Image (spheres, rainbow, N blue to C red):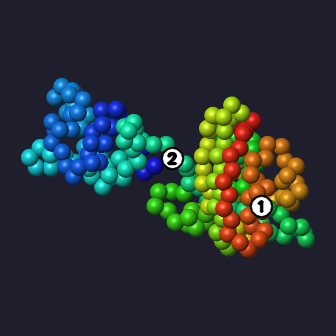
Amino acid sequence: MSTQIDIHPVQSSILCRLLFTKEGRFKDLNTLNLSTDHFSFHIKQLTDWGLVKKLEKGKYTLTPKGKEFANRFDTDKNEVERQAKVAVLLVAVKTIKGKKKYLIQQRLKQPYFGFWGFVTGKIAWGEITKEAASRELNEETGLKGNIKLVGVKHKIDYTQDQKLLEDKYFFVFKVTNLKGKLKEKFEGGRNKWLTEEEILKLKNLFDGAEESMNFIKKPIFKFSEIKYLVKKY
């Protein structure tokens, strides 16, 4: 999210009201009929955050920042909708002593502490996907390489009793011709080159890791969408 704000229900009602009008007067925005002091506090908070600005003649309107923020509202519930995260997933591969090996990473932070998977990272606000892939590769491994988009995977994790834990879209990149010195350890994880057979034998391997390797095996663009019931989180 570009704006991390804990919105009060009164403030949510103001933003939702302004979504459906170019501008609104103080009294028209006070749909909950609060006292003037109480309502003034909330609308001042929105202006201080830069979500709303005051116009002439006592009218208010959404700022560009406010429009982007309010556009993610569920207007029936007056709250920001929770949406899937968007990230990159990097399947780096090279031949070492005649064997094809993949760069695998053990996660040493929560959630999924101790799990093994491929290098991943969130796409920053306004960031091009390929730029995000290059940045994450260098930040977490110290390496650079040729990066090619090979597919998109939608991975949804549930608890054993069907409670939603994670909802993520990954832009999957194949990485070859790697250069640089590998960071074996970094804050939050460690990296290792392993064969496919070695990876599939790992304890606490992320669901979908084998599928991620399959993404880079054929020269076709792939899309997958799978729900998983996870045993650990």
Above or below 178: residue 171: above
Q: Please rate how many residues cluster around mark 1, counting C-alpha atoms within 10 Å: few if below 14, some from 14 to 19, many from 20.
A: some
Q: SS of the residue at dot 2?
A: loop
Give how far across and how far down residue 104 sits, in percent: 77, 56
Q: Please rate how many residues cluster around mark 2, counting C-alpha atoms within 10 Å: few if below 14, some from 14 to 19, many from 20.
A: few
Q: Which mark is residue 86?
A: none
The residue sitting at 21% across, 27% down in the picture is: 34
Give how far across and how far down residue 151 sits, in percent: 66, 65
The residue sitting at 71% across, 44% down in the picture is: 228
Q: Quadrant of residue 45?
A: top left
Describe residue 69's horizontal placement relative to residue 123 as left or right. left
Q: Earlier in the sequence, mark 1 or mark 2?
A: 2
Amino acid type, residue under disc 1 in the picture: Met
Above or below 19: residue 229: above
Q: SS of the residue at dot 1?
A: helix
Amino acid type, residue under disc 2 in the picture: Gln
The residue sitting at 66% across, 54% down in the picture is: 225
- Considering every residue shown, the one lying at the far right of the view is 98
Describe residue 177's horizontal placement relative to residue 22 as left or right. right
Give how far across and how far down residue 107 sits, in percent: 71, 46
Above or below 156: residue 131: below
Describe residue 118's horizontal placement relative to residue 45 as left or right. right
Q: Find disc 2 in the rendering and name its residue.
A: 83
Q: Find disc 1 in the rendering and name its residue.
A: 213
Tell me if I can see residue 140 in this picture.
Answer: no
Per the model, the C-alpha gap separating discs 1 and 2 is 27 Å
User: Do tag 1 and tag 2 residues touch (Cβ < 8 Å)?
Assistant: no
